[in-house]
Image (cartoon, helix red, strand yellow):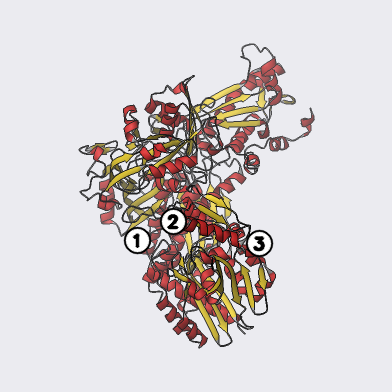
Amino acid sequence: MNDQTLTPEERAASLKGMGSSRKRVEDVRFTQGKGNYVDDIKLDGMLFGDFVRSPYAHARVKSVNKEAALALPGVIAVLTAEDLSPLGLHWMPTLAGDKQMVLADGKVLFQGQEVAYVVAEDRYIAADAVELVEVDYEELPVLTDPFEALKSDVVLREDLEGQTEGAHGPRKHHNHIFTWEQGDKEATEAILAEADVVAEEMVYYHRTHPCPLETCGCVASMDKVTGKLTLYGTFQAPHAIRTVVSLISGIAEHNIRVISPDIGGGFGNKVGAYAGYVCSVVASIVTGQPVKWVEDRMENLMSTAFARDYWMQGKIAATKDGKITGLWCHTTADHGGFDACADPTKFPAGFMNICTGSYDIPTAYLAVDGVYTNKAPGGVAYRCSFRVTEAAYFIERMIEVLAIKLNMDAAELRRINFIKADQFPYQSALGWEYDSGDYHTAWDKALKAVDYEGLRAEQSQRIEDFKAGKTRKLLGIGLTHFTEIVGAGPVKNCDILGLGMFDSCEIRIHPTGSAIARLGTISQGQGHATTFAQIIASEIGLPADDITLEEGDTDTAPYGLGTYGSRSTPVAGAATAMAARKIRAKAQMIAAYLLEVHDNDVEWDVDRFAVKGAPERFKTMKEIAFAAYNQAIPGLEPGLEAVSYYDPPNMTYPFGAYICVMEIDVDTGEWDVRQFYALDDCGTRINPMIIEGQVHGGVTEALAIAMGQEIAYDEMGNVKTATLMDFFIPTAWETPNYTTDHTVTPSPHHPIGAKGVGESPNVGGVPAFSNAVHDAFRPFGLVQSHMPHDHWRIWKIANGLGMHG
Amino acid sequence: MIPAGFEYHRPGDIASAIGILQEYGDEARVIAGGHSLIPMMKLRMAEMGHLVDLQAINELKGVNVGADTVTLGAMVTQHELITHDGLGSAIPLIREAALQIADPQVRYAGTIGGNVANGDPGNDMPGLMQCLNATFELSGPDGTRSVAAREFYEAAYFTAREDEEILTRITIPVPGAGVGQAYEKQKRKIGDYATAAAAVMLGNGQASVAMTNLADTPVWSESASAALADGDVDGCVAAMLDAIDPVADNRGPVEFKKHVAAVMLRRAIARAQSRAS
């Protein structure tokens, strides 16, 4: 054999397995414009759907007149709640245990809500017909403030009137959804009462939106001959969508095929089920023709799932030398008109109880009150595990606020409160078991990398220069040490609509030694086809280049809960490794047979099984694959395939240390990120280049959120930021350079030790940017100021501190 | 984001274009680069039966740099303003401002004529043209007339141009040697309109200052310009703050905009001064 001359290291490298910065195989088609997205799908006789949407945030819908629209040539149908009601489809269940109107049933609860669905021969006629549908509204009082909503006599959800019990326990008010409590309230309050120092602050994480490059859409195609429904769509969880469609439509699940083609970013926006999907399915069933619906940018920003909008009142207690003794948090969560959060069923506020962060806080209490308002529903995990960004922002602001109160350096305050490496696995006061971590090592590495002492010295000089009138620019040093909780999750406590949050992988090895693997997840840009092939390559010794990955077709892929919450690598990545190990186990038996030795007399060596003590006698995986298909091996079935459904024993807990250095012009509020250092520990690193790309993308989204991006409403409930003129998406010009770094603390319970990384940069980035703004003004007396830190809000800080003379 | 239906016209000369405008009256609109009009059409905030595309009219193209005046055809793109050699040395202010408009893709299509004729107070070129004391040439059924940029703007989207007229040409006096020029613009991001922007010319005992997006029209202030000509920077800023009338929007409240207007103006003055000889 030629490769006898290669060392094991050389053979391993040729596989491009784990640890290789293998180029993304997806990019060949994307960079040539050859991707296949939902809007690229064209079927014979395809019709187009478009929505009539409410211009009002709260109004009674007195009548809908379709006549003029129906009279327009090319218009096939106009659906209203009245038409869907006989099918029971005018409302649909939400992922959060609430229900949501598909089309306005007597009233509307947010601007942009779907009122009627027009079906026409082309999208131009559909758009014209939307203008011709006459809707008679009677305006109602609008509630955009969750605190006001909890006091108001105005009943938003008349359908729930009299219901004092919600999906997550008692409702305290007609606009109240749930109260969720974790930790020990009494013990925490006792510690607060006796503490040397208590810092208290309201930390608001404003409403924003995932705003993926591709908006949401679908093509529904009902074949009336076979009775089979094919639904193409921008689904982050195609299998769950199939089950949901079956449950709400009554179509048997085997007659539904859901296909997620290429997806242009999801970031949580594409997890839920939307009115457009339901109406398109109904329209296809009624007309017998395929129906396409694709929302435009304004519809995406106004009506499909938003993120954040958490008002987090915090109290943090410490000894006078800075040891944290307790944490208290009460969150008022603005959910909009319907509770359509995408969270595991038992977690109505997601994993907000990771809010003790990276710190050894012995006692803590968290309560979250969900509230209805006249805003769009959602509350999805925008590039984060469920509510983990909110939790990380909360604790990283509270640490800074405590540092001010203690007059301590915020880096040192973190260091003395970190959970120590020897405390893992660590039981947090709010109920999680952190699997692994080494925070001190990461922190020291980060501070050294940026020359933290030098930066503080420079900042001191800058403050002097500012006071002396030599400069109008301040320097902010934004620190963050975050701990995520990702990889939902163990079936014992994680499900969505009753579906356990396991995931899956099926691998088939072909006779010539190449392979196909199918997973229950779906890439939206994460590079699954690249990285999961690398896991298999390392596990079974076939080159990653010879392994095809497929996801997103429910007729071919094994069942899984999809891609969001950084769960693909922790859960489906584990399933991939476990399926590969099943193949290797069978391959061992085949190799032993071929080498005429006992199974236990061969050992694995990168890409082959060799006889123990006689490495020159071996069978490569490629040879074994062929043997599996051409030899009758006693006691073994032909073929070489395996499937694994992986139920993770625990979540994974990626962490990181981020430092942002920012220049701020006090006269204009303009900012400039001079330096951004991101150290991530995501356990075992599968593809360092993809990790770096994920960090760059995620930190850029974090920059957007912290520095300007928001979904803002006026007092009438009008969305003020529904176009990309006002909704901040950074261009290359606004995007800083990033320095990435890492430590590696493998997850002890994950088959390959990986933890997930796609969302870490958003979780850690937002507090790093926000803390930099706060840090710049800290010497002048700033304690807390709400995001987004756009020019005028930064200017307002400076103005409030008397910096404008 | 789909516009209502319309008829598309592409005349080959100015007379034909005017003929179409006469035939359809306020049913017709001309389109140059389309970067203001097309978004409004997609939002269905602008609906017209007839769209008259000016891109095939050669008379509307070309940059002519003379000793005393510069003439710009209405269909000259922002990109051409940036890359034209002679223009950059004759009136560097134009290139400096054009580089701060939107992004390269927009500048390849966006035109000077569309920018000044649309009457959007967010556009940069109207204030700049007022600062430079440009003259707009309008062609209509009754022939051609000239209107000073400083007299052209009446209110947001309302200008001295009649419905059946087309803005065809812009004439700009070349500032004397030694005149310093500067355009200072604060914006939230690339592609955004100005939070506040200032155009300043200064030198040879004369001065001219105009500001953008701080009222429903561009603001050129005679008293602010006079104060600056006298070397009174504080007086200039005070007069300008008196002249502007910003409204609150997503860029910030009125007090912020006024503050930033003063900062931009002072910075533009300082830079223009440093460039004057």
Picture disc at residue A398: none
Nearest to the observer: residue A196 or residue B106: B106
Residue A733 in the figure: left or right of residue B65: left
- The residue sitting at 37% across, 36% down in the picture is A95
Say which chain tag 3 marks. B
Say which chain tag 1 marks. A
Q: Identity of the amino acid at label 3?
A: Asn
Q: Which dot, 3 or 2, sits closer to the camera?
A: 3
- The residue sitting at 28% across, 54% down in the picture is A192
Q: Position of residue B148 (x, y in %)?
A: 52, 75
Residue A660 visible? The answer is yes
Picture disc at residue A414: 2
Q: Identity of the amino acid at label 1?
A: Lys
Q: Position of residue A109 (x, y in %)?
A: 31, 45
Q: Earlier in the sequence, mark 2 or mark 1?
A: 1
- The residue sitting at 48% across, 86% down in the picture is B232
Q: Which dot, 2 or 1, sits closer to the camera?
A: 2
**Residue under numbered circle 1:** A320
